[in-house]
Image (cartoon, rainbow, N blue to C red):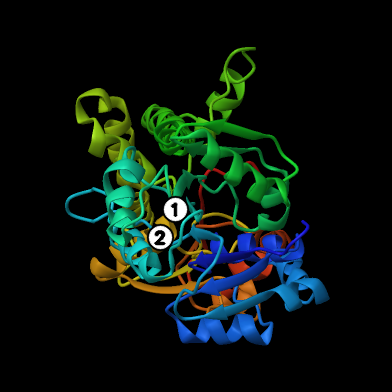
Amino acid sequence: MAEAKQVVVVGTGYVGLPAALMLARAGWRVVGVDINENIVRAINDGVLHLKEAELQELLHDPQVRQNVSARQSPCAADVFIIAVPTPVLPRQKVADLSYVVRAIESLLPYLRPGNLIIVESTIPPLTCRNVVTPLLERSGLRVGVDLHLAHCPERILPGDVFYEIVHNDRVIGCAEPVGREMARAVYASFVTGELYLTDDVTAELCKLCENTFRDVNIALANEFAAVAEGLDIDPLEVIRLANRHPRVNIMRPGIGVGGHCIPLDPWFIKEVDPANSRLIFTARLVNDEVPHKMAARIRRAVAHIMSPRLVAVGMSYKPDTEDTRESPALEIVQILTADGYQVTHFDPLVAGHEYTSLAAAVKDADCLLLLVEHKVVKEAWSREQDAVRAAMRTPIVLRFYQDD
């Protein structure tokens, strides 16, 4: 890069901060913007607030430290990247675009001709055209003429961010060719995966399709599991044997679907086209019901015990991460607690909820719920299961769709 250009990244969480650090290592001058002053201070002090060892190491790289800084409000730049959350409004089940709107509005005083604005946040189709473009044009500059607007949805996995942000293929969507090439140059500076150029609406829907595909297939696995259990046979054995067919690849059932993408993105498709998303809607309902079914299974297991003491292990939305966003494990515990059960909840990866040992955690308990089996949890169970059962008042142990 002949001249170091400046990039402002609005939102420095699981998506924005890794992007900011990779751009800084690639030679861009990067300003991370976050309304949380503690996050801003942590970045400027070189203290990462994500549990990603590779990214923490990257933050200590001299080139990165030289090129990255953080502040609470935007400033002038050549490129602006929006990486803020887009949650679902819980009652309406539609996208809450308020964070995106506020992020765009915060840029207006700093926009100048030739700027590229990239939205990485996951958004419903037509958001770039119908929401973001009118907001940007309040600056007096025209999108597609004075400004260039692209959508490049993130493709990263918490727990493996460093590898995925570099090696995954990326989809770059823009309504006009100049903006596409400008966005390609940004990502080509650190992405080794393929860069696929398309229009903005295609890119918006593409991201939603990726996560909805997984949601629908998980729902199918969860329904197979429910049917198998109703027939009093092993659901994992059924799925294992079915997958011996050369054109069948059924996913593993679970206690529910969590995380910041899969449980949310299908609603964005239903929002824009409910008539043609009936299967998607049904899959969402199926997966949303699963924590309630797991809670019912737990209630049946302890129905013969007066005032049972339950110990749950696992708070995150999936194994081997501390990320608790939309966690079905948390929902199961909330359901049981609301029903009046006494539940103590641990997770060795979630700060403030660790245990000294599995056996110590279950002392005098009636039921151990291994809700999320991190690698360290599996190892502890394998090592301590005799001690665990001996420490319990009633040695009931419930595991959920585990082979071992």
x 17%, y 54%: residue: 91
Identified by mark 1, the residue type is Ser
Q: Nearer the viewer, residue 53 or 331?
A: 53
When asked about the image quadrant of residue 343, the answer is: bottom left
Q: Amino acid at mark 2?
A: Pro
Secondary structure under tag 1 reads loop
- Quarter of the image with the C terminus is top right
Q: Is residue 337 above or below residue 223?
A: below
Residue visible at 59% across and 66% down in the picture: 17
Mark pair 1, 2: CA separation:
6 Å
Of residue 223 and residue 212, the one placed in the foreground of this image is 212
Residue linked to disc 2: 85
386 and 254: which is toward the camera: 254
Q: Is residue 178 in view?
A: yes
Using the image, determine if residue 108 lies above or below residue 205: below
Where is residue 391? Give x, y as percent: 58, 75
Residue located beneath label 1 in the image: 121
Near mark 1 (Cα within 10 A), the count class, few <14, some 14-19 or many ≥20, is many
Query: Residue 213, image x and y in percent?
Result: 46, 31
Using residue 341 as the reference point, say whether residue 175 is left or right of it: right
First along the sequence among labels 1 and 2:
2
Give the residue at the far top of this rendering.
Answer: 246
Q: Is there CB contact under 8 Å for labels 1 and 2? A: yes
**Quadrant of the snapshot with the N terminus:** bottom right
Rendered location of residue 110, percent (x, y): 43, 69
Furthest-left residue in this view: 92
Looking at the image, residue 184 sits to the left or right of residue 34; the answer is right
